Structure formats: C-alpha cells, structure tokens
Image (cartoon, rainbow, N blue to C red):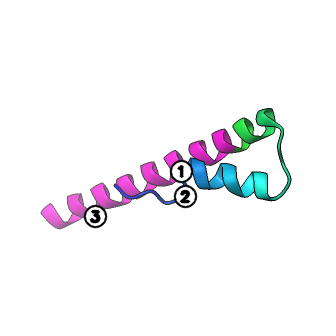
Amino acid sequence: MPSFGIEPERLENLLKNLGIQDEKIIVVVKGIFDINNRMIEAHVDRMINEALDRRLK
C-alpha cells in the first residue's frame, strides 16, 4: 500500500529547516503525522473493500 503522507525523515528535515530543533516537538509532530497516515490508509482500505464487495454481489 502506498504511503499517503510525508515520510518521517523528510518531515524531520522539514521541521529542522524551519528552525525547529527541539527533539520532543519533532517526535510529537512525527507521531501526529503517523497517526493521520494510518487513519487515511485504513479509510482507503475500507473504501476498496466496500467497492470489491459491491462488485462481487
């Protein structure tokens, strides 16, 4: 399954380029993005499964 968000390394580099150096902030932001990505992937999986179920009926 493709990733729908930004990779953790790119996100960390982006934050550091913006001047955010605090590791605690970086960890929290990366965690938020990870949760969001998982929610998006779960939603897409659900949509695909529903479409396949409709097609099989």
CA gap, disc 2 and disc 1: 6 Å
Residue at horizontal 43%, vertical 48%?
42
Q: Which residues are magenta?
A: 30-57
Quick one: 48 or 9, which is closer to the camera?
A: 9
x, y percentage for residue 30?
66, 43
Residue type at numbered disc 3: Ala
Residue type at numbered disc 1: Asn
Is-magenta flag for residue 9?
Answer: no
Is-magenta flag for residue 52?
Answer: yes
Residue at horizontal 73%, vertical 37%?
28
Can residue 39 be seen by looking at this rendering?
yes
Q: Under tag 3, what secondary structure?
A: helix
Q: Quadrant of residue 55?
A: bottom left
Mainly helix, strand or loop, the magenta region?
helix
Sequence-wise first label, 2 or 1: 2
Q: Nearer the viewer, mark 2 or mark 3?
A: 2
Task: Identify the residue at the far left of this view.
Answer: 56
Describe residue 3's horizontal placement relative to residue 45 as left or right: right
Quick one: 36 or 47, which is closer to the camera?
A: 36
Q: Nearer the viewer, mark 3 or mark 1?
A: 1
Q: Which mark is residue 5?
A: 2
x, y percentage for residue 15?
76, 53
- Residue at which label 3 appears: 51
Sequence-wise first label, 3 or 1: 1
Q: Quadrant of the N terminus?
A: bottom left
- Residue at which label 1 appears: 37
Residue type at numbered disc 2: Gly
Residues under numbered marks 2 and 1 in contact, where contact means CB atoms less than 8 Å apart: yes
